[in-house]
Image (cartoon, helix red, strand yellow):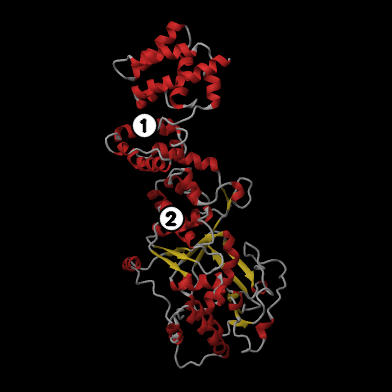
Amino acid sequence: MARFGAPRDRKRPLAPRSRLFRPWLARVCRWHRLSSIFLRLNGWTPVSYSDHPRSQAADARGEGVRVRFAPSPTGFLHVGGARTALFNWLFARNQRGTFILRIEDTDLERNRPELVEGILDGLRWLGLDWDEGPFYQSQRLPGYAAAAEKLLSKGAAYLCHCPPEKYAGGDSADEAGTAKSEIKRIVRCSCRDAKPSTADQNPAVRFRVPLGTTTRFDDAVFGPREIHNDEMEDFVLLRSARSASGGTALPTYQLGAVVDDIDMRITHVIRGADHISNTPKQILLYRALDAVPPVFAHVPLILGPDRTRLSKRHGATSVSSYRDEGFLPEAFRNFLALLGWSSGDDTEMFRTSDLIQRFSLSGVSRTNAVFDRAKLEWFNQQYLQKLPLEELLPAIQAELEKAGLWRPEWGASQREWFARTVDLLRPRTRLLSDFSHWARAFFTDDFDYDLAAREKFWKDERLPDLLTRLTDELAALPDWTHDACDRALRQLAEKAGVKAALLINATRVALVGQPVAPPLFDTMLVLGKERVVGRLRRALPAISARSAAG
Protein backbone atom coordinates (compact mmCIF):
# COMPACT_ATOMS: atom_id res chain seq x y z
CA MET A 1 0.00 0.00 0.00
CA ALA A 2 1.46 3.33 -1.01
CA ARG A 3 2.18 5.71 1.82
CA PHE A 4 0.64 9.15 1.58
CA GLY A 5 3.30 11.62 0.57
CA ALA A 6 5.03 9.36 -1.95
CA PRO A 7 5.52 11.02 -5.40
CA ARG A 8 2.72 10.33 -7.81
CA ASP A 9 3.16 9.19 -11.38
CA ARG A 10 3.81 12.43 -13.30
CA LYS A 11 2.30 10.97 -16.47
CA ARG A 12 -1.02 10.37 -14.78
CA PRO A 13 -3.56 13.01 -15.95
CA LEU A 14 -5.42 15.01 -13.35
CA ALA A 15 -9.05 14.10 -12.80
CA PRO A 16 -11.65 16.69 -13.87
CA ARG A 17 -12.43 17.73 -10.30
CA SER A 18 -8.75 18.15 -9.58
CA ARG A 19 -8.32 20.46 -12.59
CA LEU A 20 -11.17 22.61 -11.32
CA PHE A 21 -9.61 22.63 -7.86
CA ARG A 22 -6.12 23.74 -8.93
CA PRO A 23 -6.84 27.50 -9.42
CA TRP A 24 -8.24 27.67 -5.91
CA LEU A 25 -5.33 25.62 -4.58
CA ALA A 26 -2.86 28.00 -6.20
CA ARG A 27 -4.35 30.89 -4.24
CA VAL A 28 -3.85 28.95 -1.00
CA CYS A 29 -0.19 28.45 -1.80
CA ARG A 30 0.35 32.07 -2.87
CA TRP A 31 -1.20 33.23 0.39
CA HIS A 32 1.26 31.02 2.22
CA ARG A 33 4.18 32.21 0.04
CA LEU A 34 4.87 28.66 -0.97
CA SER A 35 3.86 28.77 -4.60
CA SER A 36 6.98 26.80 -5.49
CA ILE A 37 5.43 23.88 -3.66
CA PHE A 38 2.31 24.24 -5.77
CA LEU A 39 4.43 23.87 -8.91
CA ARG A 40 5.61 20.51 -7.61
CA LEU A 41 2.26 19.16 -6.43
CA ASN A 42 2.41 16.20 -8.77
CA GLY A 43 5.44 15.10 -6.80
CA TRP A 44 4.34 16.42 -3.43
CA THR A 45 6.55 15.52 -0.50
CA PRO A 46 5.25 16.40 2.98
CA VAL A 47 7.32 18.36 5.47
CA SER A 48 10.10 16.16 6.79
CA TYR A 49 10.18 15.71 10.54
CA SER A 50 13.23 13.45 10.47
CA ASP A 51 15.52 16.49 10.12
CA HIS A 52 14.77 17.50 13.70
CA PRO A 53 17.78 16.64 15.91
CA ARG A 54 15.64 14.82 18.46
CA SER A 55 13.92 12.93 15.67
CA GLN A 56 17.31 11.75 14.40
CA ALA A 57 18.09 10.50 17.89
CA ALA A 58 14.76 8.66 17.96
CA ASP A 59 15.46 7.11 14.56
CA ALA A 60 18.86 5.98 15.79
CA ARG A 61 17.17 3.74 18.35
CA GLY A 62 14.65 2.55 15.77
CA GLU A 63 11.15 3.69 14.82
CA GLY A 64 8.98 2.72 17.70
CA VAL A 65 5.93 4.17 19.31
CA ARG A 66 5.21 7.71 18.14
CA VAL A 67 2.51 9.70 19.93
CA ARG A 68 1.48 13.34 19.88
CA PHE A 69 -0.24 15.98 21.94
CA ALA A 70 -2.03 18.49 19.73
CA PRO A 71 -3.66 21.38 21.62
CA SER A 72 -5.37 24.37 20.03
CA PRO A 73 -4.26 27.82 21.25
CA THR A 74 -7.82 29.01 21.82
CA GLY A 75 -7.60 28.70 25.60
CA PHE A 76 -5.23 27.90 28.43
CA LEU A 77 -3.88 24.40 29.05
CA HIS A 78 -6.92 22.71 30.58
CA VAL A 79 -6.70 20.01 33.24
CA GLY A 80 -8.16 17.52 30.75
CA GLY A 81 -5.62 18.47 28.10
CA ALA A 82 -2.79 18.19 30.61
CA ARG A 83 -3.97 14.69 31.59
CA THR A 84 -4.06 13.70 27.89
CA ALA A 85 -0.55 15.08 27.40
CA LEU A 86 0.65 13.18 30.49
CA PHE A 87 -0.80 9.86 29.29
CA ASN A 88 0.86 10.32 25.88
CA TRP A 89 4.15 11.25 27.52
CA LEU A 90 4.08 8.32 29.95
CA PHE A 91 3.23 5.88 27.16
CA ALA A 92 6.06 7.20 24.98
CA ARG A 93 8.58 7.00 27.81
CA ASN A 94 7.39 3.53 28.84
CA GLN A 95 7.76 2.28 25.26
CA ARG A 96 11.01 4.18 24.61
CA GLY A 97 9.12 6.02 21.91
CA THR A 98 8.76 9.59 20.69
CA PHE A 99 6.50 12.30 22.12
CA ILE A 100 5.58 14.98 19.58
CA LEU A 101 4.05 18.38 20.27
CA ARG A 102 1.82 19.85 17.57
CA ILE A 103 -0.09 23.13 17.77
CA GLU A 104 -3.39 23.04 15.87
CA ASP A 105 -3.64 26.76 15.20
CA THR A 106 -5.80 26.99 12.09
CA ASP A 107 -8.69 28.71 13.89
CA LEU A 108 -7.38 32.15 13.01
CA GLU A 109 -10.27 34.02 14.61
CA ARG A 110 -9.90 32.39 18.05
CA ASN A 111 -6.16 31.74 18.22
CA ARG A 112 -4.18 33.90 20.62
CA PRO A 113 -0.37 33.76 20.33
CA GLU A 114 0.12 34.32 24.06
CA LEU A 115 -1.86 31.15 24.74
CA VAL A 116 0.69 29.08 22.82
CA GLU A 117 3.40 30.12 25.25
CA GLY A 118 1.02 29.43 28.12
CA ILE A 119 0.51 25.87 26.87
CA LEU A 120 4.26 25.35 26.50
CA ASP A 121 4.89 26.76 29.99
CA GLY A 122 2.27 24.44 31.45
CA LEU A 123 3.87 21.39 29.86
CA ARG A 124 7.31 22.47 31.03
CA TRP A 125 6.02 23.01 34.56
CA LEU A 126 4.62 19.47 34.57
CA GLY A 127 7.96 18.15 33.33
CA LEU A 128 6.50 16.83 30.06
CA ASP A 129 9.40 17.35 27.69
CA TRP A 130 8.72 16.72 24.00
CA ASP A 131 11.09 15.02 21.56
CA GLU A 132 9.89 16.77 18.39
CA GLY A 133 8.17 20.08 17.78
CA PRO A 134 6.33 22.19 18.45
CA PHE A 135 4.99 22.00 14.88
CA TYR A 136 2.34 24.48 13.78
CA GLN A 137 -0.50 23.59 11.43
CA SER A 138 -0.67 27.17 10.16
CA GLN A 139 2.76 26.57 8.61
CA ARG A 140 1.61 23.44 6.77
CA LEU A 141 -1.37 24.65 4.73
CA PRO A 142 -0.09 23.44 1.33
CA GLY A 143 0.13 19.91 2.72
CA TYR A 144 -3.57 19.88 3.58
CA ALA A 145 -4.45 21.34 0.18
CA ALA A 146 -2.39 18.64 -1.50
CA ALA A 147 -4.18 15.93 0.46
CA ALA A 148 -7.53 17.42 -0.54
CA GLU A 149 -6.40 17.41 -4.17
CA LYS A 150 -5.47 13.76 -3.90
CA LEU A 151 -8.90 12.91 -2.52
CA LEU A 152 -10.60 14.93 -5.26
CA SER A 153 -8.56 13.26 -7.98
CA LYS A 154 -9.65 9.79 -6.88
CA GLY A 155 -13.28 10.74 -6.32
CA ALA A 156 -13.11 10.41 -2.53
CA ALA A 157 -14.04 14.07 -2.10
CA TYR A 158 -16.05 16.67 -3.97
CA LEU A 159 -16.31 20.44 -4.27
CA CYS A 160 -19.16 22.00 -2.32
CA HIS A 161 -20.53 25.34 -3.51
CA CYS A 162 -23.15 25.69 -0.80
CA PRO A 163 -23.12 28.60 1.67
CA PRO A 164 -21.15 27.57 4.78
CA GLU A 165 -24.17 28.00 7.04
CA LYS A 166 -26.38 25.66 4.99
CA TYR A 167 -24.88 22.48 6.36
CA ALA A 168 -23.44 23.81 9.60
CA GLY A 169 -23.81 21.48 12.52
CA GLY A 170 -22.22 18.63 14.35
CA ASP A 171 -21.79 14.98 13.68
CA SER A 172 -24.88 12.80 13.65
CA ALA A 173 -23.08 9.95 15.38
CA ASP A 174 -23.36 9.63 19.12
CA GLU A 175 -20.37 10.35 21.35
CA ALA A 176 -19.54 6.70 21.82
CA GLY A 177 -19.38 6.12 18.07
CA THR A 178 -21.67 3.10 18.16
CA ALA A 179 -24.19 2.09 15.55
CA LYS A 180 -27.80 2.85 16.39
CA SER A 181 -30.71 0.50 16.01
CA GLU A 182 -32.21 2.72 13.33
CA ILE A 183 -30.08 4.57 10.81
CA LYS A 184 -30.56 8.29 11.19
CA ARG A 185 -31.41 10.04 7.95
CA ILE A 186 -28.62 12.32 6.79
CA VAL A 187 -29.35 15.11 4.32
CA ARG A 188 -26.60 14.78 1.73
CA CYS A 189 -25.19 17.88 0.10
CA SER A 190 -26.62 18.36 -3.39
CA CYS A 191 -23.09 19.01 -4.66
CA ARG A 192 -22.21 15.34 -4.05
CA ASP A 193 -23.65 14.24 -7.38
CA ALA A 194 -23.59 17.55 -9.26
CA LYS A 195 -21.43 18.11 -12.30
CA PRO A 196 -18.19 20.02 -11.66
CA SER A 197 -18.58 23.77 -12.04
CA THR A 198 -16.04 26.51 -12.62
CA ALA A 199 -18.42 29.28 -11.61
CA ASP A 200 -17.50 29.19 -7.92
CA GLN A 201 -13.82 29.89 -7.35
CA ASN A 202 -14.08 29.48 -3.58
CA PRO A 203 -15.63 26.08 -2.94
CA ALA A 204 -15.34 24.00 0.17
CA VAL A 205 -14.15 20.41 -0.10
CA ARG A 206 -16.26 17.62 1.38
CA PHE A 207 -15.39 13.99 1.93
CA ARG A 208 -17.55 11.56 -0.02
CA VAL A 209 -18.56 9.07 2.67
CA PRO A 210 -18.90 5.60 1.12
CA LEU A 211 -22.49 4.52 1.73
CA GLY A 212 -23.96 1.12 2.48
CA THR A 213 -21.09 -0.10 4.64
CA THR A 214 -20.01 -0.02 8.27
CA THR A 215 -16.80 1.42 9.70
CA ARG A 216 -15.35 -0.61 12.56
CA PHE A 217 -12.35 -0.14 14.81
CA ASP A 218 -11.00 -1.65 18.01
CA ASP A 219 -10.34 1.03 20.60
CA ALA A 220 -7.47 0.18 22.95
CA VAL A 221 -9.58 1.31 25.93
CA PHE A 222 -13.25 1.01 24.95
CA GLY A 223 -12.96 -2.07 22.76
CA PRO A 224 -14.77 -2.74 19.45
CA ARG A 225 -16.80 0.16 18.05
CA GLU A 226 -18.73 0.58 14.84
CA ILE A 227 -20.96 3.01 13.00
CA HIS A 228 -22.97 2.59 9.82
CA ASN A 229 -21.58 4.97 7.23
CA ASP A 230 -25.09 6.06 6.26
CA GLU A 231 -25.23 7.78 9.67
CA MET A 232 -22.18 9.86 8.82
CA GLU A 233 -22.44 13.19 7.05
CA ASP A 234 -20.18 14.17 4.15
CA PHE A 235 -17.92 16.15 6.43
CA VAL A 236 -15.95 19.20 5.32
CA LEU A 237 -12.22 18.83 4.73
CA LEU A 238 -11.33 22.34 3.58
CA ARG A 239 -13.52 25.30 4.42
CA SER A 240 -14.55 27.71 1.70
CA ALA A 241 -12.31 30.77 1.49
CA ARG A 242 -15.50 32.82 1.81
CA SER A 243 -15.95 31.64 5.39
CA ALA A 244 -12.31 31.78 6.44
CA SER A 245 -10.47 34.64 8.05
CA GLY A 246 -8.35 36.44 5.47
CA GLY A 247 -10.14 34.76 2.60
CA THR A 248 -7.97 31.66 2.82
CA ALA A 249 -9.34 28.12 2.80
CA LEU A 250 -8.31 26.30 5.95
CA PRO A 251 -8.42 22.62 6.88
CA THR A 252 -10.95 21.30 9.33
CA TYR A 253 -9.88 19.32 12.37
CA GLN A 254 -10.53 16.01 10.59
CA LEU A 255 -8.23 16.67 7.64
CA GLY A 256 -5.52 18.48 9.57
CA ALA A 257 -5.25 15.78 12.23
CA VAL A 258 -5.11 12.89 9.78
CA VAL A 259 -2.62 14.49 7.37
CA ASP A 260 -0.31 15.44 10.23
CA ASP A 261 -0.59 12.06 11.91
CA ILE A 262 0.35 10.38 8.63
CA ASP A 263 3.27 12.71 7.99
CA MET A 264 4.52 12.45 11.57
CA ARG A 265 4.21 8.66 11.49
CA ILE A 266 1.98 8.57 14.58
CA THR A 267 1.45 5.00 15.77
CA HIS A 268 -0.98 5.63 18.65
CA VAL A 269 -3.60 8.37 19.01
CA ILE A 270 -4.33 8.80 22.72
CA ARG A 271 -7.02 11.41 23.36
CA GLY A 272 -10.23 12.16 25.26
CA ALA A 273 -13.33 10.01 24.90
CA ASP A 274 -15.19 12.99 23.43
CA HIS A 275 -13.22 12.28 20.23
CA ILE A 276 -14.57 8.76 19.74
CA SER A 277 -17.17 10.05 17.30
CA ASN A 278 -14.39 11.56 15.16
CA THR A 279 -12.59 8.24 14.80
CA PRO A 280 -14.77 6.60 12.08
CA LYS A 281 -14.41 9.71 9.93
CA GLN A 282 -10.68 9.72 10.36
CA ILE A 283 -10.37 6.01 9.61
CA LEU A 284 -12.15 6.63 6.30
CA LEU A 285 -9.70 9.43 5.59
CA TYR A 286 -6.68 7.25 6.37
CA ARG A 287 -7.92 4.61 3.96
CA ALA A 288 -8.71 7.14 1.24
CA LEU A 289 -5.17 8.52 1.60
CA ASP A 290 -3.72 4.99 1.29
CA ALA A 291 -2.48 4.98 4.88
CA VAL A 292 -2.88 2.49 7.71
CA PRO A 293 -4.79 4.00 10.67
CA PRO A 294 -2.94 4.18 13.99
CA VAL A 295 -4.06 2.53 17.20
CA PHE A 296 -6.78 4.64 18.83
CA ALA A 297 -7.02 4.84 22.62
CA HIS A 298 -9.67 7.10 24.10
CA VAL A 299 -9.29 8.03 27.74
CA PRO A 300 -12.25 8.80 30.04
CA LEU A 301 -13.49 12.32 30.57
CA ILE A 302 -12.79 14.31 33.74
CA LEU A 303 -15.91 15.33 35.63
CA GLY A 304 -16.59 17.75 38.45
CA PRO A 305 -17.86 16.60 41.87
CA ASP A 306 -21.45 16.83 40.56
CA ARG A 307 -20.59 14.33 37.78
CA THR A 308 -20.91 16.90 35.00
CA ARG A 309 -18.15 17.87 32.58
CA LEU A 310 -15.38 19.73 34.44
CA SER A 311 -15.81 23.46 33.85
CA LYS A 312 -15.10 26.84 35.43
CA ARG A 313 -18.16 26.55 37.64
CA HIS A 314 -16.32 23.77 39.49
CA GLY A 315 -13.38 26.10 40.17
CA ALA A 316 -10.06 26.51 38.41
CA THR A 317 -9.64 24.39 35.27
CA SER A 318 -6.33 25.65 33.85
CA VAL A 319 -2.98 24.20 34.84
CA SER A 320 -1.56 27.70 35.34
CA SER A 321 -4.18 28.42 38.02
CA TYR A 322 -3.09 25.45 40.10
CA ARG A 323 0.57 26.35 39.61
CA ASP A 324 -0.12 29.90 40.81
CA GLU A 325 -2.09 28.61 43.82
CA GLY A 326 0.98 26.79 45.03
CA PHE A 327 0.70 23.18 43.91
CA LEU A 328 3.91 21.28 43.26
CA PRO A 329 4.33 19.89 39.74
CA GLU A 330 5.27 16.48 41.16
CA ALA A 331 2.03 16.32 43.16
CA PHE A 332 -0.12 17.60 40.31
CA ARG A 333 1.43 15.08 37.91
CA ASN A 334 0.84 12.21 40.34
CA PHE A 335 -2.78 13.32 40.84
CA LEU A 336 -3.44 13.63 37.09
CA ALA A 337 -2.01 10.19 36.41
CA LEU A 338 -4.64 8.61 38.64
CA LEU A 339 -7.53 10.39 36.90
CA GLY A 340 -8.57 7.48 34.74
CA TRP A 341 -5.59 5.16 35.20
CA SER A 342 -4.66 2.59 37.83
CA SER A 343 -1.52 0.58 38.40
CA GLY A 344 -3.62 -2.43 39.39
CA ASP A 345 -3.09 -2.11 43.14
CA ASP A 346 -3.77 0.45 45.87
CA THR A 347 -0.58 2.44 45.30
CA GLU A 348 -1.22 6.19 45.14
CA MET A 349 2.16 7.85 45.56
CA PHE A 350 4.39 7.42 42.53
CA ARG A 351 7.77 8.79 41.67
CA THR A 352 7.92 9.79 38.02
CA SER A 353 10.20 6.87 37.23
CA ASP A 354 7.63 4.51 38.77
CA LEU A 355 4.82 6.04 36.72
CA ILE A 356 6.83 5.54 33.54
CA GLN A 357 7.65 1.95 34.42
CA ARG A 358 4.10 0.95 35.34
CA PHE A 359 1.99 2.94 32.87
CA SER A 360 0.08 0.99 30.24
CA LEU A 361 -3.04 1.52 28.17
CA SER A 362 -4.52 -1.61 29.72
CA GLY A 363 -4.67 0.26 33.03
CA VAL A 364 -6.80 3.07 31.60
CA SER A 365 -10.39 2.96 32.83
CA ARG A 366 -13.54 3.30 30.75
CA THR A 367 -15.25 5.09 33.65
CA ASN A 368 -15.13 8.86 33.76
CA ALA A 369 -12.85 10.28 36.46
CA VAL A 370 -13.95 12.79 39.11
CA PHE A 371 -11.71 15.76 39.91
CA ASP A 372 -11.46 15.88 43.70
CA ARG A 373 -9.87 19.11 44.92
CA ALA A 374 -9.44 17.76 48.46
CA LYS A 375 -7.55 14.75 47.11
CA LEU A 376 -5.28 17.02 45.09
CA GLU A 377 -4.48 19.04 48.21
CA TRP A 378 -3.76 15.80 50.07
CA PHE A 379 -1.28 14.80 47.37
CA ASN A 380 0.37 18.21 47.57
CA GLN A 381 0.66 17.97 51.34
CA GLN A 382 2.28 14.55 51.04
CA TYR A 383 4.84 15.85 48.58
CA LEU A 384 5.57 18.93 50.71
CA GLN A 385 6.36 16.62 53.61
CA LYS A 386 8.27 13.92 51.73
CA LEU A 387 10.29 15.75 49.11
CA PRO A 388 13.98 16.07 50.02
CA LEU A 389 14.43 19.47 51.63
CA GLU A 390 17.00 20.57 49.06
CA GLU A 391 14.49 19.92 46.27
CA LEU A 392 11.75 21.85 48.06
CA LEU A 393 13.71 24.97 49.02
CA PRO A 394 13.85 26.48 45.49
CA ALA A 395 10.06 26.24 45.20
CA ILE A 396 9.60 27.96 48.57
CA GLN A 397 12.07 30.65 47.56
CA ALA A 398 10.12 31.28 44.34
CA GLU A 399 6.89 31.60 46.33
CA LEU A 400 8.44 34.09 48.77
CA GLU A 401 9.94 36.07 45.90
CA LYS A 402 6.52 36.27 44.25
CA ALA A 403 5.06 37.58 47.53
CA GLY A 404 7.88 40.10 47.99
CA LEU A 405 9.12 38.42 51.17
CA TRP A 406 12.41 36.91 50.05
CA ARG A 407 15.70 38.18 51.48
CA PRO A 408 18.97 37.33 49.67
CA GLU A 409 20.79 36.33 52.86
CA TRP A 410 18.42 33.37 53.27
CA GLY A 411 20.05 31.83 50.23
CA ALA A 412 23.56 32.54 51.50
CA SER A 413 24.68 33.26 55.07
CA GLN A 414 21.30 32.34 56.59
CA ARG A 415 20.52 29.36 54.38
CA GLU A 416 20.65 26.99 57.36
CA TRP A 417 18.04 29.11 59.16
CA PHE A 418 15.85 29.14 56.04
CA ALA A 419 16.07 25.35 55.73
CA ARG A 420 15.21 24.82 59.41
CA THR A 421 12.23 27.16 59.15
CA VAL A 422 10.84 25.44 56.06
CA ASP A 423 11.34 22.04 57.67
CA LEU A 424 9.44 23.23 60.76
CA LEU A 425 6.55 24.60 58.71
CA ARG A 426 6.01 22.03 56.00
CA PRO A 427 4.14 19.38 58.06
CA ARG A 428 1.36 21.97 58.52
CA THR A 429 1.16 23.28 54.96
CA ARG A 430 -0.90 22.06 52.00
CA LEU A 431 0.17 24.59 49.37
CA LEU A 432 3.30 26.54 48.58
CA SER A 433 1.22 29.68 49.03
CA ASP A 434 0.77 28.75 52.71
CA PHE A 435 4.38 29.82 53.26
CA SER A 436 3.58 33.38 52.16
CA HIS A 437 0.11 33.59 53.72
CA TRP A 438 -0.54 31.39 56.76
CA ALA A 439 3.18 31.27 57.67
CA ARG A 440 3.92 34.86 56.63
CA ALA A 441 5.02 35.88 60.15
CA PHE A 442 8.02 33.56 59.96
CA PHE A 443 9.48 35.64 57.13
CA THR A 444 8.41 39.21 57.93
CA ASP A 445 7.34 41.40 60.84
CA ASP A 446 4.55 42.81 58.67
CA PHE A 447 1.62 40.57 59.57
CA ASP A 448 -1.85 40.92 61.10
CA TYR A 449 -3.37 39.20 64.11
CA ASP A 450 -6.17 36.80 63.29
CA LEU A 451 -9.36 38.45 64.57
CA ALA A 452 -10.95 35.26 65.91
CA ALA A 453 -7.71 34.31 67.66
CA ARG A 454 -7.49 37.74 69.33
CA GLU A 455 -11.05 37.47 70.55
CA LYS A 456 -10.53 33.99 71.96
CA PHE A 457 -7.01 34.04 73.41
CA TRP A 458 -6.47 37.67 74.52
CA LYS A 459 -9.62 38.25 76.57
CA ASP A 460 -8.31 37.24 80.03
CA GLU A 461 -7.78 40.38 82.12
CA ARG A 462 -4.64 38.90 83.72
CA LEU A 463 -2.80 38.65 80.39
CA PRO A 464 -1.29 42.17 80.14
CA ASP A 465 0.58 41.73 83.42
CA LEU A 466 1.51 38.10 82.79
CA LEU A 467 2.86 38.72 79.28
CA THR A 468 4.81 41.76 80.45
CA ARG A 469 6.50 39.58 83.08
CA LEU A 470 7.05 36.80 80.51
CA THR A 471 8.67 39.24 78.12
CA ASP A 472 11.08 40.39 80.81
CA GLU A 473 11.87 36.78 81.79
CA LEU A 474 12.63 35.84 78.18
CA ALA A 475 14.74 38.94 77.59
CA ALA A 476 16.89 38.00 80.59
CA LEU A 477 17.59 34.42 79.47
CA PRO A 478 21.34 33.84 79.02
CA ASP A 479 20.79 30.85 76.70
CA TRP A 480 18.09 30.83 74.02
CA THR A 481 17.13 27.16 73.97
CA HIS A 482 13.92 25.17 73.72
CA ASP A 483 14.15 24.03 77.36
CA ALA A 484 15.00 27.50 78.68
CA CYS A 485 11.98 29.11 76.99
CA ASP A 486 9.70 26.26 78.08
CA ARG A 487 10.90 26.48 81.69
CA ALA A 488 10.52 30.28 81.87
CA LEU A 489 6.90 30.18 80.70
CA ARG A 490 5.81 27.26 82.85
CA GLN A 491 7.46 28.61 86.01
CA LEU A 492 5.70 31.93 85.50
CA ALA A 493 2.35 30.18 85.04
CA GLU A 494 2.89 28.14 88.20
CA LYS A 495 3.78 31.24 90.26
CA ALA A 496 0.73 33.09 88.94
CA GLY A 497 -1.57 30.14 89.53
CA VAL A 498 -2.75 29.92 85.92
CA LYS A 499 -2.63 27.15 83.36
CA ALA A 500 0.37 27.20 81.04
CA ALA A 501 -2.03 26.96 78.07
CA LEU A 502 -3.28 30.50 78.81
CA LEU A 503 0.20 31.90 78.22
CA ILE A 504 1.06 29.52 75.37
CA ASN A 505 -2.00 30.41 73.29
CA ALA A 506 -1.73 34.16 73.92
CA THR A 507 1.99 34.15 73.14
CA ARG A 508 1.49 32.17 69.91
CA VAL A 509 -0.96 34.75 68.57
CA ALA A 510 1.41 37.56 69.54
CA LEU A 511 4.35 35.94 67.75
CA VAL A 512 2.77 34.67 64.49
CA GLY A 513 -0.75 36.12 64.43
CA GLN A 514 -2.39 32.69 64.07
CA PRO A 515 -4.17 30.33 66.48
CA VAL A 516 -2.45 27.32 64.92
CA ALA A 517 1.28 27.07 64.27
CA PRO A 518 4.22 24.74 64.93
CA PRO A 519 4.95 24.03 68.63
CA LEU A 520 5.48 27.33 70.43
CA PHE A 521 8.99 26.75 71.71
CA ASP A 522 10.20 25.46 68.32
CA THR A 523 8.69 28.61 66.82
CA MET A 524 10.52 30.77 69.37
CA LEU A 525 13.83 29.13 68.48
CA VAL A 526 13.36 29.78 64.77
CA LEU A 527 12.26 33.39 65.28
CA GLY A 528 15.13 34.13 67.64
CA LYS A 529 15.29 35.99 70.93
CA GLU A 530 15.29 39.51 69.52
CA ARG A 531 12.19 39.02 67.38
CA VAL A 532 10.28 37.13 70.09
CA VAL A 533 10.85 39.84 72.69
CA GLY A 534 10.11 42.59 70.18
CA ARG A 535 6.86 41.02 69.00
CA LEU A 536 5.61 40.43 72.53
CA ARG A 537 6.20 44.08 73.41
CA ARG A 538 4.53 45.19 70.18
CA ALA A 539 1.45 43.08 70.97
CA LEU A 540 0.99 44.29 74.57
CA PRO A 541 -1.15 47.37 73.75
CA ALA A 542 -3.54 45.28 71.65
CA ILE A 543 -3.68 42.61 74.36
CA SER A 544 -4.46 45.24 77.00
CA ALA A 545 -7.21 46.72 74.84
CA ARG A 546 -8.82 43.32 74.22
CA SER A 547 -8.69 42.17 77.86
CA ALA A 548 -10.15 45.48 79.03
CA ALA A 549 -13.09 45.00 76.69
CA GLY A 550 -14.03 41.83 78.59
Instruction: Report whether 368 appears left or right of 521.
Output: right
**What amino acid is at disc 2?**
Asp
Label 1 to label 2, Cα distance in Å? 30 Å
Residue 379 visible: yes
Observer-nearest residue: 367 or 216?
Answer: 367
Amino acid beneath label 1: Thr
Tell me the SS state at disc 2. Answer: helix
Q: Is residue 255 above or below residue 537?
A: below
Q: Which residue lies under the disc numbered 2?
A: 121
> Where in the figure is residue 43, as x and y percent of width and height?
43, 85
Image point 35% across, 27% down: which residue? Answer: 526
Mark 2, other Cα within 10 Å: few <14 / some 14–19 / many ≥20? some
Residue 452: image tag: none
- Count the marks: 2
Lateral position of residue 346 relative to residue 301, left or right: left
Binning the other alpha carbons within 10 Å of mark 1 as few (below 14), some (14 to 19) or many (20 upward) gives: some
Residue at the location (50% across, 11% down)? Answer: 462
Q: What residue did someone put label 1 on?
A: 421
Q: Earlier in the sequence, mark 1 or mark 2?
A: 2
Q: Is residue 261 found left or right of 183 in the rendered image?
A: left
Q: Is residue 407 above or below residue 292?
A: above
x, y percent for residue 65: 41, 64
- Quadrant in which the C terminus appears: top right
Q: Position of residue 7 (x, y in %)?
A: 43, 84
Residue 113, image x, y percentages: 48, 63
Q: Nearer the viewer, residue 381 or 489?
A: 489
